[in-house]
Image (tube, helix red, strand yellow):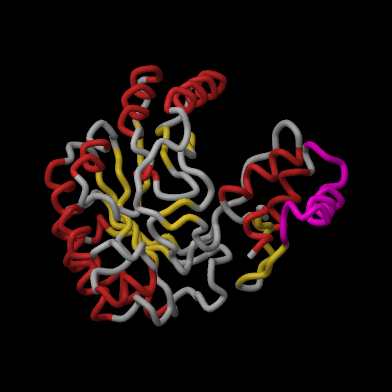
Amino acid sequence: MSLGVNNIPYKTCSYSCIYCQLGRTLNLTVGRGEFFDWRDIVGEVVEYFRGLGGGVDYITFVPDGEPLLDKSIGREIEWIKRETSTPIAVLTNASLLYLDEARSDLQEADLVSLKVDAVSEDVWRTVNRPHPTLKLERILEGVVEFARGFKGTIITETMLVRKFNDGGVELEKIAEFLRELSPRKAYIAIPVRPPAESFVLPPEASKLVEAHEIFKRRLGEDRVELLNLPEPPPPSAKGDPAAWLLSVTSVHPLKLEYAAGSLRHVVEDPEKLIAELERQGLIKIVEYSGARFIVRWFREQQKQ
């Protein structure tokens, strides 16, 4: 069980990955700043955590962008741990780990997830679409340096996209690099939610098997896991049904059938509520891989 923390404004990131479930990056940047008052973040997390009565395994920084763009994240981690005595996890695309201060900010975390989708320059630029000032070689060096000095748990995630980074040569290179990091677990993921670009597709089943075998040979079978199934239905909606749905879908697209099922516990006609939110332009219904998803729709997106 994880309590998620969103410390970055919507789609402020150093990457604009072709598969991102939140769409294209609106503010492509590598400039670290204080987007919110760090005291407000700590206060809200602690208040919500206490309202839950504890009961979570991690408090996780998993924002709508790159968490390390927040220059106060180290302070936030320190104070949240002090106030809750709960392990802290951070999910980062790793692009800023060439910076000494970014590596330092993560030292008090208990678990860090590092994204490694490619280790070849052309593949990396095509899949992750990084800020133009970023250099892959420097990033990979920073990731290795961080892994060598970090005392907590490291896991990695590699998102495979059909015909982009699922070839055997690139998979071998990625697996070899991951071995140098010695992660507790290397996760292989595929797009299961509507991506930023319509041409993004999950790999063929044979490619998933090949990827798993390559990673297994390099890292060991117990350290490799496939994340190739859609997420289970969310728990029942709580509080105001419209606010709940907008909150959930602002973090990730939600299957229409799951949303209706969860909302039935708090509203008589979920389909009517969903239709009204769509009419207001607050959500959109999209189709992907034979399923219908609800996507949160923001004014910035509507202007594009």
Of residues 70 and 6, the one nearer the viewer is: 70
At 17% from the left and 37% from the top, the residue drawn is 151
In the rendering, at what x and y percent does residue 150 appear?
A: 18, 40
As for residue 277 lying within the magenta part, the answer is yes
In the image, is 150 to the left or to the right of 44?
Answer: left
Image: magenta residue range: 266-284
In the rendering, at what x and y percent does residue 78 appear?
A: 31, 25
Residue 39, visible in the rendered structure: yes
In the rendering, at what x and y percent does residue 287 appear?
A: 67, 69
The image quarter in which residue 211 lies: bottom left
As for residue 9 lying within the magenta part, the answer is no
Residue 1, visible in the rendered structure: no
Figure check: 80 above or below 200: above
The image quarter in which residue 88 lies: top left
At 77% from the left and 38% from the top, the residue drawn is 265
Of residues 54 and 205, the one nearer the viewer is: 54
In the rendering, at what x and y percent does residue 282 appear?
A: 73, 51
In the image, is 239 to the left or to the right of 9?
Answer: right
At 51% from the left and 53% from the top, the residue drawn is 11
At 67% from the left and 61% from the top, the residue drawn is 303
The C terminus: image quadrant:
bottom right
Of residues 137 and 157, the one nearer the viewer is: 137
Tell me how many marks there are. 0
